[in-house]
Amino acid sequence: MENTPPHLSRRDAIRALGIVIGATSLGACAGKTQTPALGGIGDPIPGVDTPPSSTANNNSGSAAQEALADWRNRNHSAETLGGILPKGVVARDSWTNAKPIIALADPMQRVTRITIHHEGSTPFSSTSSRDVRQRLDQIRKFHLSRGWADIGYHYVIDPAGRVHQARPIALQGAHVKYNNEQNLGIMVLGNFEEQSPTAKALASLQQFVGSQMSQYKVPLRSVYTHQEIRPTLCPGRNLQGRLVAMRRAGGVLARA
Ligand SMILES: [Zn+2]
């Protein structure tokens, strides 16, 4: 799958531009096994793939291809890509000066759903900003090594509860295979099959997901964990249960 030419995934962008129905998506973490392979950073990643149902009707649409090319050729800056940073979020330039590779990116359409992940690699519990910055950049580089435009998630929460800007929100994410369209990706650093999220990370996650639900008018039923969309252990048993509780009637998110 990793040898699939990057342009195949561009169909996502065509769909995102609202011109042609068709989809190919990237996924950041998937699979039943959570072996910290491939450098040990990030969830196991399936690579670029094409959903069986969308292979037939994607060779048409030259206008869509042109629209996508036009979008890619625009003078994207960190500011225009990132939009207005949500309150309290640590800007991307605190941990990397690298820009996303727009030639490999797809535009994000209106956000209609949110998916929550864990990192799923070796356990991580440092609250040091320096350690977190390094970890974020390791994940970014790992995702680039998969042929992606950038780190797959839009926001990452660390064990101290800080929320970090990751992939700019103007770009479609790469975090749930076949399901990246209109999907805001939030990841919590750590492996919650093997450790428990910190109270600060959980509190921050609740607050931040709630704020994003409000911002994009995403209903509670459209807030997912990765394993609720695809077969994977993500976000780990020690976070999955907490998220189910958060969404339950009376939970914090249910009141967002
Ligand atoms: Zn995941």
Image (cartoon, rainbow, N blue to C red):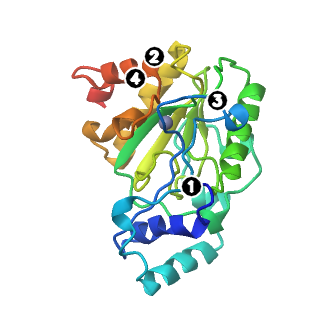
Q: In the drawing, does residue 126 fall left or right of residue 17?
A: right
Identify the residue at image location x=42%, y=53%: 178
Mark 1: few, some, or many residues within 10 Å (few <14, many ≥20)?
few
Q: Nearer the viewer, residue 172 or 141?
A: 141
Residue 131, image x, y percentages = 76, 26
Q: Nearer the viewer, residue 28 or 251?
A: 28
Residue 24, image x, y percentages = 45, 61
Q: Locate the C terminus by quadrant.
A: top left
SS class, disc 4: helix
- In front of the other: label 2 or label 3? 3
Q: Earlier in the sequence, mark 2 or mark 3?
A: 3
Residue at image mark 4: 240
Q: Which mark is residue 36?
A: 3
Taking the view exactly as shown, the residue that stands out farthest to the bottom is 62
> 72 above or below 66?
above
Mark 2 residue CB less than 8 A from any atom of ligand 1: no
- In front of the other: label 2 or label 1? 1
Residue at image mark 1: 1
Identify the residue at image location x=65%, y=23%: 122
Picture quadrant where residue 28 is located: top right
Residue at image mark 2: 238
Q: Earlier in the sequence, mark 2 or mark 1?
A: 1
For the residues bearing labels 2 and 3, Cβ distance under 8 angstroms = no
Q: CA distance from mark 4 to mark 3?
A: 19 Å
